[in-house]
Amino acid sequence: MVRRVLTAPLYGLALGVLSLVGLVQLVVVFVIGHAGMPPPTVPIRWARWLPNLCRRLVGRWSGTPVPVPYRPPPPKPEPDADGWYRDEDQLYSTPWIALFKRQWDWLTQDPATLRDHGWTLLNPVVGGVPALLPAGLIAAGAWRPLPLGVLLVATGFALGPAVMRWQAWWTPVLLAPTERTGRTQAWAWTAPRAMAVVRLASTIGTAVGGLGLAALHVLAIVPTFLLWWPEVTLVSRRVVQRRRDELTRWTGLDVPEPYLPEPEPPTPEADGTYRLRRPLVTVLYRSAEELRQAQRRQWTVRDPAAWRDLAWLLVNPLLVVVLAAVPLALVGYGFVGLLWVAAWAQLVRLFVPYDSWFAWTALTDLVPRLTVVPGPLSPLVGLVATVAGLALAPLALLAYAWVSRLLLAPTKAAVLARRVDRLTETRADASDAQAAELRRIERDLHDGAQAHWVAMGMRLGVVEQLIDRDPEAAKNLVVQAQQSSVNALRELRELIRGIHPPVLAERGLPDALRALAMDSPLDVEVRIDLPGRAEAPIEVGVYFSVQELLTNAAKHAEAVTAEVDVAHRDGVLRVEVADDGRGGADPRNGTGLRGVQRRIATFDGTLSLRSPRGGPTSVILEIPCALSLPRTSTSSETG
């Protein structure tokens, strides 16, 4: 007991110093992470040493172990047979980029990373100030006159065990695994709002950098620097596109890419020159490089999205000031100025007499009406301001995304033009697919049923000659002719099934998919929720698409089980096929997935693929359509 009382202030002093080290470390990680060198995964991973050290020290000194909550690191990428390194649907010639992406996903998707940063930010106030209080009281009492000095020293030693009990409670709140501590309501409310504050703060950097890009854009309009325009435009596109992706990920608002497709590579004329046709004139070029540069200038100048990007770069700083300033000011001044600084000022006040509420005093000088609140109550004002800023941050971020979307998303005319281009392309694909299907049917009839019918006719001709002279031989030929007719009929049925399965026409898509699951070598679970039937061509397309996906899962992915989930929501038929195979599926590596894409694109459908290396694979087909013949068909069946 005596040893615990004597050592607790020293333990608290060590933990208090580490809390200050954590704050410095957080700033260093933020700066290095945004500097680009080394990669941001290095400082984030390195910063884990401090939470790990505090876990060990608190567990040892308090007797309450704090387990390490981190997920295991990802495996190093291994080359494929062709020497390339794969990360989901991307291929790399070296392992470093794939390794960086894996480690980035590992660190950023691990909840313990965010909890570590939250603990580092809060610990100097919640853990550091109480931890240093016993040592501070003892140090202050050592040079104070009696009896005040003895009272301060005794109080410091008396508070030591209580402070360690507080550390034993506080440290696991954010540093222990969530399975152990549970996801508290306070953290569930605070974490996403604190992340919204961080994201709002990150918009400041984009706004400042965007002004520089906007200045380069304006400079490139000058004829002397016009050659810079394509390069400046492409650089700004990368920056703006990154912001589009971030807004979609942060808020769920879809901000699609609005740019016109890049021009086709130039092809020479018969005389070896290259031509660029413009509305009033055709320009001749002697080299492909000159034409390519002219195409890039024309492409970037005529694309309305390039000018809308420029408008957003100019408007973005104003958006940041209007929408982000209030939440950032409330959280920054309320938490840092009125809570964080005020808490540490009370410790310093033990040694140096001064106004420990100077942050509040400075505010009351600007707003005299706030003097009705005394300085000691300013931390409550800071707490209210912090909560208000956290509450406003998601709304401000959503408003920022919505206003940015007005300039960064494609216009209705651009969406319509893209839709027309896509429909034109899918119509051509559909015509090619139809022609290929007709050739396949012709080939199958010629090589299959027709051959059996010809053989049957020849045998019957021989039977006519042998029936009087050799009845036994004629009888054998009749049997062979009968077998040829059976074979021809079987192949005709298989051919018809390949064109339009009878079960699909007679019983609809649900029963057809169940039959498909029963015929599959995989253990397939089918879940269907359709209030009616789609048009026949759509049902045929979905049927053969699911058939192709199950075949791929069994043949290439070495899967054992698969799931087929079919539902109709908000005018969209959604089909998901998932398997437990080895993953690594890529439409560029085979014709199966590309064929499924072309098949559903005929109906303006889309295919989404997620197939990380090692599995599992999930393919989602979405086809806009209406259902008819209302009837309930809800089932869950294993085939």
Image (spheres, grey):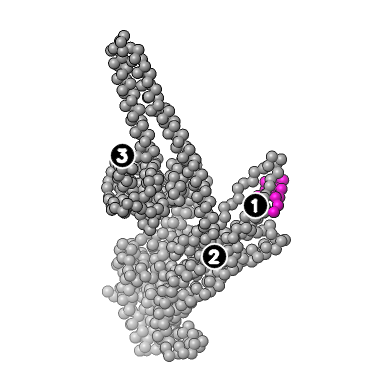
Q: Which amino acid does label 3 sit on?
A: Asp
Residue at which label 1 appears: 295
Q: Position of residue 71 (x, y in %)?
A: 37, 57
Q: At 44% from the left edge and 49% from the top edge, which residue is drawn? A: 603
289 falls in the magenta region: yes
In the rendered structure, which disc, 3 or 1, sits on the residue that comes first in sequence? 1
Give the magenta part as a residue range: 280-295
Q: Which of 182 and 202 is in front in this view?
A: 202
Quarter containing the C terminus: top left
**Tag 3: Cα neighbours inside 10 Å, few (<14), some, or many (≥20)?**
few
Residue 214 seen in the current view: yes
Q: What residue type is labelled 1?
A: Gln
Q: Name the quadrant containing residue 163.
A: bottom left
Quarter containing the N terminus: bottom left
Q: Which mark is residue 407?
A: 2
Q: Where is residue 475 in the image (x, y as percent from the top left)?
A: 29, 16
